[in-house]
Image (tube, helix red, strand yellow):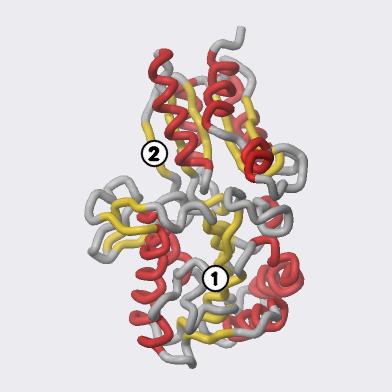
């Protein structure tokens, strides 16, 4: 087995959802304790086609279609993990994880600690978040801050097919519960993914674009917009370094601090609303560890403090877009 950081993913092109499907299939072949459980994941292959064909290959004992009862089937998976299995549970929308907070936050996240380390909970909860499909306020939220806040959970948010596959494989092999959030706009996106076996270490970020004038941190669906903004900024002579943490817990603070010390400017882009967000915590870490290197205040660009509208134009206006990122970068770079 080889371990890849994501920067050498330069081979065949497949879709994000296909990369996730490959990760699930490979881990199910490798480890008989891995099984999948969720609504519509069997015969339908999942609403986003991530689990397509897996029922035919592994059968209904390992690819289990669940009734619409998230609390029940997530609790089942927590119990299965405690007793030695490696379940991957799918919740269709991250918004619906509000129904399984007790199972994840009060049980899965705490069990290893409360057993004195004697019991592991190797559970992966796959779900998808973010806006962009006109699915309105109850199906379009970015709720990563909920799980970022909870000790005992790991939190993964891949932005590319290569990262999605390598990180999901690592998440399944983890002995602690992992919240794995996929962005709804990324499933059909193509990117290079190696055919050879590889994993990506949790807690290892990636430089998606090198630069020396400003550091931009973004994750999940904001990465592609940030890269587009970075390309646009070159016309103004600004070379932006784009950092994708890939996993928010654990967070690659070393990579972030090294970049900020080099560029002396920082912009953090998140789709979630600003209040209580992950960006604010990352900013506090940089302020504490690299304040003397900053040549301007840290700029945080986030979603507006509103439920996501159904109207697609209003939806677009409620979360950061490429021009917003460009403006935020210029504000901090040109600050006096």
Q: Position of residue 123 (x, y in %)?
A: 56, 74
The residue depicted at 46 percent of the width and 81 percent of the height is 34
Q: Position of residue 246 (x, y in %)?
A: 48, 49
> Considering the image in quadrants, where does the C terminus appear?
top right
The residue depicted at 61 percent of the width and 74 percent of the height is 117
**Farthest-out residue, top:** 336
Is residue 148 visible in the rendered image? The answer is: no
Q: Is the residue 266 above or below the residue 111 in the image?
A: above
226 left or right of 66? Answer: left
**Residue closest to the eye, 185 or 101:** 185
Label whose residue precedes the other's in the sequence (1 or 2) = 1
> Considering the image in quadrants, where does the N terminus appear?
bottom left
**Residue closest to the eye, 168 or 20:** 20
59 left or right of 135? Answer: left
Secondary structure beneath dot 2 equals strand
Q: Is the residue 145 above or below the residue 31 in the image?
A: above
Is residue 168 visible in the rendered image? The answer is: yes
Q: Residues within 10 Å of mark 2 (few under 14, many from 20)?
A: some
The residue depicted at 38 percent of the width and 87 percent of the height is 56
Secondary structure beneath dot 1 equals strand
Q: Are marks 1 and 2 in contact (CB under 8 Å)?
A: no
Q: Residues within 10 Å of mark 1 (few under 14, many from 20)?
A: many
* Number of numbered tags placed on the structure image: 2
Give how far apart the Cα atoms at labels 1 and 2 are: 26 Å
Q: Position of residue 228 (x, y in %)?
A: 43, 32
Q: Position of residue 39 (x, y in %)?
A: 59, 78
What mark, if any, has residue 208 been given in the picture? 2
Residue position marked by numbered label 1 in the rendering: 124
Dividing the picture into quadrants, the one containing residue 198 is bottom left
């Amino acid at each position: 087995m080889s371990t890849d950081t994501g920067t050498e993913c330069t081979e065949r092109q497949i879709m994000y959802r296909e990369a996730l499907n490959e990760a699930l299939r490979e881990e199910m072949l490798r480890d008989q304790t891995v099984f999948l459980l969720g609504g519509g994941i069997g015969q339908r292959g999942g609403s986003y086609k991530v689990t397509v064909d897996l029922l035919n290959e592994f059968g209904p004992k390992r690819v289990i279609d669940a009734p619409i009862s998230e609390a029940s089937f997530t609790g089942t998976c927590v119990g299965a993990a405690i007793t030695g299995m490696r379940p991957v549970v799918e919740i269709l929308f991250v918004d619906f994880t509000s129904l399984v907070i007790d199972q994840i936050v009060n049980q899965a996240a705490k069990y290893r600690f409360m057993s004195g380390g004697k019991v592991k909970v190797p559970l992966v909860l796959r779900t998808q978040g973010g806006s962009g499909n006109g699915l309105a306020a109850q199906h379009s939220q970015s709720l990563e801050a909920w799980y970022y806040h909870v000790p005992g959970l790991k939190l993964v948010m891949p932005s590319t097919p290569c990262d999605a596959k390598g990180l999901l494989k690592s998440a399944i092999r983890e002995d602690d519960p992992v919240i794995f959030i996929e962005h709804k706009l990324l499933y059909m996106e193509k990117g290079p993914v190696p055919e050879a076996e590889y994993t990506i270490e949790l807690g290892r970020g990636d430089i998606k674009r090198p630069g020396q004038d400003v550091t931009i941190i973004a994750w999940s669906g904001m990465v592609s917009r940030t890269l587009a903004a970075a390309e646009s900024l070159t016309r103004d002579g600004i070379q932006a370094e784009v950092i994708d943490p890939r996993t928010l817990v654990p967070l690659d603070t070393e990579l972030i601090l090294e970049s900020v010390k080099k560029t002396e400017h920082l912009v953090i882009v998140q789709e979630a609303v600003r209040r209580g967000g992950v960006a604010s915590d990352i900013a506090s870490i940089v302020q504490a560890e690299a304040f003397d290197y900053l040549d301007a205040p840290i700029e945080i660009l986030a979603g507006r403090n509103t439920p996501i509208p159904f109207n697609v134009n209003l939806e677009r206006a409620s979360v950061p877009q490429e021009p917003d990122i460009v403006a935020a970068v210029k504000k901090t770079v040109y600050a006096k």
